[in-house]
Image (spheres, rainbow, N blue to C red):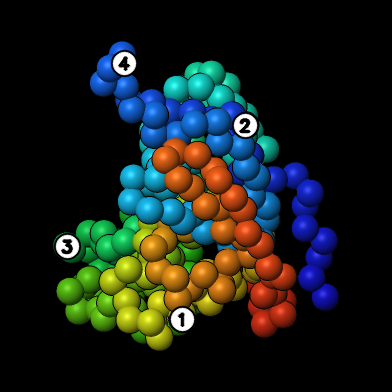
Amino acid sequence: MLEPVNPTPLVELRAISKHFGEGETRVDALADITLSVFAREVVGLVGPSGSGKTTLLNVIGCVTEPSSGWMRLNGEIVYDERWQRRDLRRLRLEKIGFIFQTHNLLPFLTANENVMEVLELAGATSAAARSRAGALLDYLQVGNRGSHMPAQLSGGEAQRVSIARALANRPKIILADEPTAPLDSERAGIVMDLLRRIASEQHAAIICVTHDETIFDRFDRIFHLRDGRLVSTSSKPALVGAFAGASDLN
């Protein structure tokens, strides 16, 4: 049986706005965004091009500074009309995992070394990083590819390695920017089912920007954006039955 979900959101935004420029050249990329995402949820950010999806993902990822509002990530207020931490790089290492449209693996490192790199940046010893990387690649069923260079991996394998890298420092918040864009529909479904499994087993919140309507049924909720505004939220029963097991990777 699944444990109760913590009622405190892992991601909480209140009245987040972002504009670029001033006066006649001002562009309001986000306007008064308020939303929450909880542990074990996989949610989508959808909308037409220019609706603010990527800007919102970058705000949550502490890459783009909002113009106003309030944001809490995994229990810590990180923005309240200004950043509440000076070292945003450390904040990202501690709290957030990123999955990109392309795998962005370092081409001169093996799959195992790509995952180790993130751990060592956070201060792990080489031995600890190697052990953690190996366990993650095994968990994602690409452990036998750990010694291979990115160019030797298939698209699906490379995306799994990039997911392992995103999980390296045990973040509770995982942000994915078009994670299925380079994949065919079958492999896209496999990746989304894998993300659902991770959300359930790792008690994580996963937020995906996507245009891919074939994966909409994999989301617990979908936030619809238009012209920088949250115009609606749709939801459905969570698909947790297949992923109710526990994991030793927490």
Residue 66, image x, y percentages? 45, 27
Q: Earlier in the sequence, mark 4 or mark 2?
A: 2
Disc 3 crowd, CA 10 A, few/some/many (<14, 14-19, 20+): few
Disc 1 crowd, CA 10 A, few/some/many (<14, 14-19, 20+): some
Identify the residue position indicated by label 4 in the image. Answer: 22
- Amino acid bearing label 1: Ile
Tags 2 and 1 touching, CB below 8 Å: no
Q: Quadrant of the C terminus?
A: bottom right
Residue 55, image x, y percentages? 39, 40
Using the numbered discs, state the Cα–Cα distance from disc 4 to disc 2 in whole angstroms.
23 Å
When the figure is inspected, residue 103 is found, relative to residue 47, above or below; the finding is below
Residue drawn at (45%, 45%) of the image: 226
Specify whether 107 is left or right of 206: left
Secondary element at tag 1: helix
In-front residue for pair 160/231: 231
Question: Which disc, if any, is residue 14?
Answer: 2
- Amino acid bearing label 2: Arg
Identify the residue position indicated by label 3 in the image. Answer: 108
- Amino acid bearing label 4: Glu
Nearer to us of marks 4 and 3 is 4
Name which quarter of the figure residue 150 lies in: bottom left
Secondary element at tag 4: loop
In-front residue for pair 47/112: 47
Name which quarter of the figure residue 89 lies in: top left
Q: Earlier in the sequence, mark 2 or mark 3?
A: 2
Identify the residue position indicated by label 1 in the image. Answer: 190
Using the rendered image of the protein, determine whether residue 172 is visible from the camera's viewpoint. Answer: no
Residue 166, image x, y percentages? 44, 58
Q: Earlier in the sequence, mark 1 or mark 3?
A: 3
